[in-house]
Amino acid sequence: MTRYTGLIDAYRSRLPLPPEAKAISLGEGRTPLIKLENLVRHEGVEADIYVKFEGANPTGSFKDRGMTMAVTEAVHRGAKAILCASTGNTSAAAAAYAARAGIKSFVLIPEGKIAMGKLAQAVVHGAVIVQVRGNFDDGMRLVKEVSETSPVVLVNSVNPYRLQGQKTAAFEIVEALGEAPDYHCLPVGNAGNITAHWIGYTECTGVGTKSCLLCNGNCQFGQAGGKAKRPKMIGYQAAGSAPFMRGAAVKNPETVATAIRIGDPQSWDPAWIVQQESGGWFDECSDAEILACQRLLAEQEGVFCEPASATSLAGALRDLKSGKIPAGSSIVCTLTGNGMKDPDIILKAGLPQLIEVDAVRSAVERVLVDRL
Ligand code: F0G
């Protein structure tokens, strides 16, 4: 057994880092790919559905994959500080990896709309936290402006190293299944992750080396006998924050899935290239669908993801039931973040009746007997 030391060590030859750059890692990657069993039966759908549980990453979201790359590269260049705007998860990852690297982090968060667990992460890792009187899109505009003139490295997904790290999730899926799935479903916010997955699938399946618009035919990594199949990529936005469905930026995005409360995605054009190249589509899910699916997954399979993450599975189930995704397909849904980041959303729905007993054996036994 050799100790797993993170995705840079695992995939170094396929990542664009100088060989001498020291990896800043928390052991991210190698997340579980869980095949759904009970839920598939419960919903009466016929398909091989897998969830890639990115909530198992060190800071509880897929952002760690991108952040290990962005921070490693920044530190190698001598950076002393990083900067990001965030709906919560990017700031948590930035703060943690900056702490690990011994550099400063500055995070801009939108007013009042960030899950408590994520805020706690930024606090505990010592980030300088700036609450912007505005939403995520305002924060994004500001960090782009400020990073032009200040000695900080911008670590939002406009930093190309972020997507390079995040593409490794696709590598892991192809390694685990032996080939790409038929469909890959993701929640879409800034649209970086869906783009990163397509880069990953393109590289590790060895296709698209000439035609891929994203890499301009420069994929040098995947040519060694890869399998030709790539998945159809499906991106789901929250209905109140669905610029791709409206065909224009959404001014005041709103959704219970605060992680994807984004009206003006930074990777707009690449994401549409992904849709075209893969033959997939974009759609939207209502807040009610998202929350119902989060519960369903937790109750049926023991997997607790955050609301934004459940968007991928909510959409996939709907498309399976309508036949848009054919029965018998293999489907991977990315669960982008851990449910424990946002306990408020569960408790807001009301605590179940707690059963209070005296501290005696017979009282506890009575509870069991009544319910077994
Ligand atoms: N799911 C979760 C849990 C997220 O935190 C995000 C993005 C997404 C999905 C969407 O991914 O932006 O690549 O399309 N969160 C960013 C943040 C914006 O600041 O943490 P995307």
Image: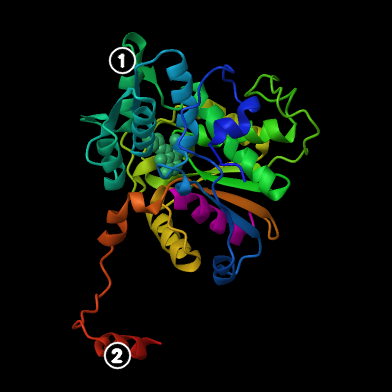
What residue is shown at x 44% (from left), y 63% (from top)?
Answer: 298
Residue 11 relative to residue 84: left or right:
right
Q: Nearer the viewer, mark 1 or mark 2?
A: 2
What residue is shown at x 54% (from left), y 58% (from top)?
Answer: 318
Residue 259 relative to residue 358: left or right:
right
145 falls in the magenta region? no
Q: Which residue is mark 2?
A: 366
322 falls in the magenta region? yes
Callout 1 secondary element: helix
Earlier along the polypeptide chain: callout 1 or callout 2?
A: 1
Dot label at residue 289:
none
Residue 344 image offset from top left, x and y in percent: 27, 55
- Quadrant field for ligand 1: top left
What residue is shown at x 41% (from left), y 26% (from top)?
Answer: 156
Above-or-below relation of 349 to 183: below
Mark 2 is on which residue type? Arg
Residue 233 relative to residue 146: left or right:
right
Q: Which residue is mark 1?
A: 146
Provide the residue span drawn in magenta. 309-325
